[in-house]
């Protein structure tokens, strides 16, 4: 009897997913533990391994199908020695939905454009960069060739943007080769389907902005001591490795920020909390979610018990988590949960911004770029490296005074980075 392969639930909250692709085809012999498909969940694309051995008898859901329900029948596996005829009389136990391949999202140009009874088909000329077809009359094409004018830089004035002879002559008169002409892409837009990651981000952030009463607190932190310590530690690692070897570590400013947040939460534990209708949940562990940009969205891998780890340990763990996040290799428990989030756009040159709270968490810290600024110290103007951070807060969980206390603790650790190395 054929073995049913069902759509797996790859996270506790998953109800459906996209069957991104099959890595096997009908007739392939597979073994237990072999990767047979890639499933796109609400957070990542994950590989699915076979549980049983046998031969792929029939793929019932096409690769690229969206919205496949959990436990839906997606394939049938023939046991070793079982004839394929067993598929003909087999009645599936699980409900099977009609599958359809993902639509091609590229907007296709029409093969013909009706411009009148005496019109001819456009010349098959392609834009050199976009690859879209350029429509020109045969006469316009001949004139352009003889006058040395490029059709790719001409805006057509004919029906449906078609280039006519007068367009070519005007381009020639403007300086040749279409100089000064505006080329409008005939395809106004293309559609890029929203993957599950983007859909979940949109839904969660919309709910957060609509349902969570946000308020924002911003402080300015001096970075000079932190930058000096970071420089010295990285220099020691490079010196120990020598010229031809990779240093054992390379600390980033973000590594110190994660540690400073963790120490701040340890000092002000009431900020490490979430809201529920029944009660405020105060977390006993300091687990920091760090936003990482990935293709098609972002994900927040978690540095667990960050208050108990050294800056060096946090640095190594964060590099590993970020690399596997971008490769869609994180396990669900590595990005689901966390009690406090950090979003750092400083590396993109953003000076300051306000992030949206990541429910059910109560706070998220938005980190801007460090830069030299003129500040007043003891009545004198001095140049210091400064960084703005903005704490977005769920007012149901954290009040203004409590948020200010946390930011004061965070700034103290940033401006006295030696405390982070103890």
Image (cartoon, helix red, strand yellow):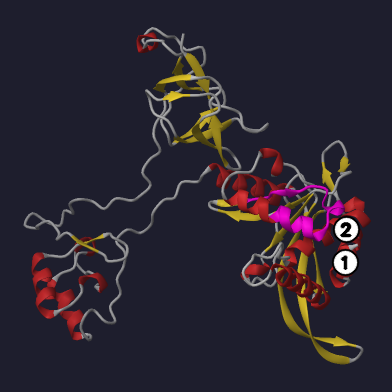
Residue 167 lies left or right of residue 300; in this view the side is left
- Quadrant, the C terminus: bottom right
Residue 29 x %, y %:
42, 23
Residue density around tag 1, few if under 14, some if 14–19, many if 20 or more, within 10 Å = many
Task: State the mark number for residue 413.
Answer: 1
Find residue 89 and report its horizontal and vertical position in percent: 38, 7
Compared to 130, does 243 lie above or below?
Answer: below
In front of the other: 307 or 174: 307
Which residue is labeled 2 in the image?
A: 263
The residue at the point 9 percent across, 65 percent down is 138
* Left or right: 350, with 40 as reference point: right
Q: Residues within 10 Å of mark 2 (few under 14, many from 20)?
A: many
C-alpha gap between disc 2 and disc 1: 8 Å
Question: In this image, 248 relative to 408: left or right?
Answer: left
Position of 106 relative to 26 (above/below): below
Numbered badge on residue 16: none
Please say whether residue 399 is visible from this viewpoint.
Answer: no
Quarter location, residue 278: top right
Query: Residue drawn 60% across and 56% down?
Result: 293
Q: What span is colored magenta in the figure?
A: 299-318
Residue 199 in view, yes or no: yes
**Disc 2 and disc 1 in contact, CB within 8 angstroms:** yes
Q: Where is residue 107? Give x, y as percent.
A: 33, 51
Q: Residue at x 42, y 30 (%)?
A: 24
Q: Quadrant of the rendered structure where residue 129 is?
A: bottom left
- Give SS at disc 2: helix
Q: Is residue 413 magenta?
A: no
Where is 279 relative to 388, above or below? above
């Amino acid at each position: 009897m054929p073995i049913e392969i069902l759509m797996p639930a790859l996270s506790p909250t998953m109800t459906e997913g996209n069957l991104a692709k099959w890595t096997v085809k009908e007739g392939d012999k597979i073994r237990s533990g072999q990767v047979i498909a890639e499933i796109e969940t609400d957070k990542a694309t994950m590989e699915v391994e076979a549980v049983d051995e046998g031969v792929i008898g029939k793929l019932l859901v096409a690769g690229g199908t969206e919205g496949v329900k959990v436990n839906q029948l997606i394939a049938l596996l023939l046991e070793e020695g079982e004839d394929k005829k067993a598929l003909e009389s087999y009645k599936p136990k699980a409900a099977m939905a009609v599958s359809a391949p993902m639509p091609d999202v590229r907007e296709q140009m029409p093969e013909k454009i009706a411009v009148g009874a005496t019109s001819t088909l456009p010349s098959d000329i392609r834009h050199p960069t976009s690859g879209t077809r350029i429509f020109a009359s045969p006469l316009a094409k001949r004139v352009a060739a003889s006058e040395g004018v490029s059709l790719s830089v001409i805006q057509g004035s004919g029906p449906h943007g078609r280039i006519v002879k007068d367009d070519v002559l005007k381009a020639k008169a403007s300086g040749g080769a279409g100089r000064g002409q505006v080329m409008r892409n005939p395809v106004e837009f293309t559609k890029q389907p929203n993957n599950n990651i983007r859909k979940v981000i949109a839904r969660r952030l919309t709910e957060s902005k609509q349902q969570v009463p946000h308020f924002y607190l911003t402080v300015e932190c001096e970075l000079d001591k932190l930058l000096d310590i970071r420089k010295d530690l990285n220099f020691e690692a490079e010196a120990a490795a020598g010229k031809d070897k990779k240093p054992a570590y390379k600390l980033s400013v973000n590594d110190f920020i994660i540690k400073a947040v963790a120490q701040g939460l340890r000092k002000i534990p009431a900020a490490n909390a979430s809201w529920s209708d029944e009660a405020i949940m105060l977390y006993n562990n300091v687990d920091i979610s760090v936003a990482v940009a990935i293709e098609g969205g972002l994900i927040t891998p978690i540095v667990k018990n960050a208050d108990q780890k050294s800056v060096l340990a946090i640095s190594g763990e964060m590099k590993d988590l970020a690399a596997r996040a971008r490769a869609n290799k994180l396990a669900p428990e590595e990005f689901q949960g966390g009690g406090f989030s950090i979003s750092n756009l400083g590396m993109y040159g953003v000076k300051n911004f306000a992030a949206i709270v990541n429910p059910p968490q109560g706070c998220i810290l938005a980190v801007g770029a460090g830069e030299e600024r003129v500040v007043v110290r003891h009545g004198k103007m001095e140049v210091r490296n400064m960084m703005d951070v903005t704490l977005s807060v769920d007012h149901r969980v954290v009040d203004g005074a409590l948020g200010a206390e946390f930011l004061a603790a965070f700034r103290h650790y940033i401006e006295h980075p030696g405390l982070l190395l103890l």
